């Protein structure tokens, strides 16, 4: 079925509207986006705002977070995230060599798995001077695994009766992209959402040292610049404002609600951005690398967290 631009705009506008409704979950929004992509209903004028919608939503959600809880989680999560990043990057290097995957695609997939999915890939790509097709291959692998994680992780969590706290840490460490981490946390519960978001953003901070290390390794080959994710600083600022001005609690709760619904919209846009044609071109070995790295960090972090729970 062929849709003209007016019909496509109407479809996207309608879905964006219902995404603001409380009965639309993050998983439903993602599936709706994927279905549009499968049927070739694309609207580049809307989907180009995916990254902004995600980052702005995270900043707004910060207004609903408790500063004392954030500080407590940060102390506990810093070492865990550092170990996970080191583990994934080393494993990714070895598996890239073993599977004979393109080296730059291997670095991008490893960084996306280790830190924060698409954001890490976007930050690392100019540092290693990755080409467009290499970036798109890595993004396709990460996005597809993200979509699976958003649905699969809450099911596994409920099956093993994981606590909200344990699931929050596990999702933050083992799921690639911030959107899917937050989405999985939102599906599992409020406490899981709070912990998952905070630990995930601590993990995202490793973009900076990783990019610097890669820049030093590539110093004779590149003039790439380190891209610092601006939204992390604003997220911290929103938490601080909520703590400093408790009299505005009602207003901040509205901001927090808007952030949660914005996250649902971002997940819909992520689903709509997935390209089946690019997924086929990414190659089997790239997917195997992504799946193996994901399985390694997922199982290792699950075992560690459940044993220490």
Image: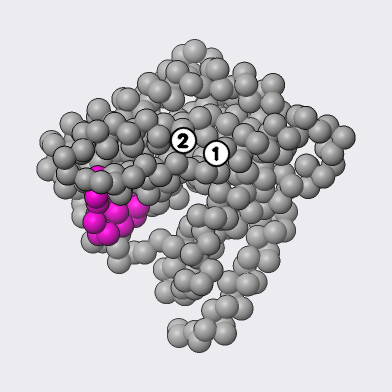
Above or below 268: residue 162: above
Provide the residue designation for mark 1: 232
User: Are the residues at dot 1 and dot 2 in contact (C-beta closer than 8 Å)?
Assistant: yes
Percent x, y of residue 59: 63, 44
The label on residue 204 is 2
Percent x, y of residue 192: 61, 32
Q: Residue at x 78, y 42 (%)?
A: 252
The first of marks 1 and 2 along the sequence is 2
Percent x, y of residue 254: 78, 47
Local secondary structure at mark 1: helix
**Would you say 162 lies left or right of 279 here?**
right
Q: Is residue 141 magenta?
A: yes
Q: Quadrant of residue 248?
A: top right
**Would you say 64 lies left or right of 117 here?**
right
Q: Residue at x 62, y 67 (%)?
A: 15
Q: Which residues are magenta?
A: 128-142
Q: Is the residue marked by circle 2 packed among few (<14), some (14-19), or many (20+) residues within 10 Å?
A: many
Local secondary structure at mark 2: helix
Judge by depth and name the residue closer to the eye, 105 or 299. Answer: 105
**Would you say 218 lies left or right of 74 here?**
left
CA distance for labels 1 and 2: 8 Å
Above or below 74: residue 26: below
Q: Quadrant of residue 29?
A: bottom right
Q: Residue at x 48, y 64 (%)?
A: 48
């Amino acid at each position: 079925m062929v849709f003209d631009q007016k019909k496509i705009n109407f479809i996207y506008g309608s879905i964006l509207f219902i995404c603001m409704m409380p009965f639309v979950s993050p998983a439903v929004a993602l599936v709706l986006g994927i279905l549009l992509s499968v049927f070739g209903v694309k609207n580049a004028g809307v989907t180009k705002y995916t990254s902004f919608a995600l980052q702005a939503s995270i900043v707004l959600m910060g207004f609903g977070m408790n500063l004392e809880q954030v500080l407590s989680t940060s102390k506990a999560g810093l070492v865990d995230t550092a170990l996970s990043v080191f583990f994934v990057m080393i494993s990714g290097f070895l598996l890239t060599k073993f599977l004979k995957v393109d080296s730059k695609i291997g670095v991008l997939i490893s960084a996306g798995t280790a830190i924060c999915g698409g954001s890490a890939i976007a930050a690392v790509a100019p540092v290693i001077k990755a080409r467009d097709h290499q970036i798109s291959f890595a993004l396709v692998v990460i996005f597809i695994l993200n979509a699976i994680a958003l649905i699969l992780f809450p099911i596994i969590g409920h099956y093993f009766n994981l606590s909200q706290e344990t699931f929050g840490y596990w999702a933050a460490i083992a799921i690639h992209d911030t959107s899917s981490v937050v989405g999985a946390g939102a599906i599992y519960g409020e406490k899981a959402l709070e912990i998952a978001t905070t630990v995930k953003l601590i993990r995202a901070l490793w973009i900076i040292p990783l990019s610097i290390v890669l820049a030093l390794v590539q110093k004779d080959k590149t003039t790439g610049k380190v891209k610092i994710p601006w939204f992390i600083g604003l997220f911290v600022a929103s938490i601080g404002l909520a703590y400093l001005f408790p009299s505005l609690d009602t207003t901040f709760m509205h901001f927090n609600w808007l952030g949660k619904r914005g996250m649902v919209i971002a997940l819909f846009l992520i689903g709509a951005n997935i390209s089946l044609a690019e997924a086929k071109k990414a190659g089997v070995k790239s997917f195997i690398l992504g799946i193996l790295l994901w399985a390694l960090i997922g199982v290792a972090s699950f075992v560690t967290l459940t044993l220490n729970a």
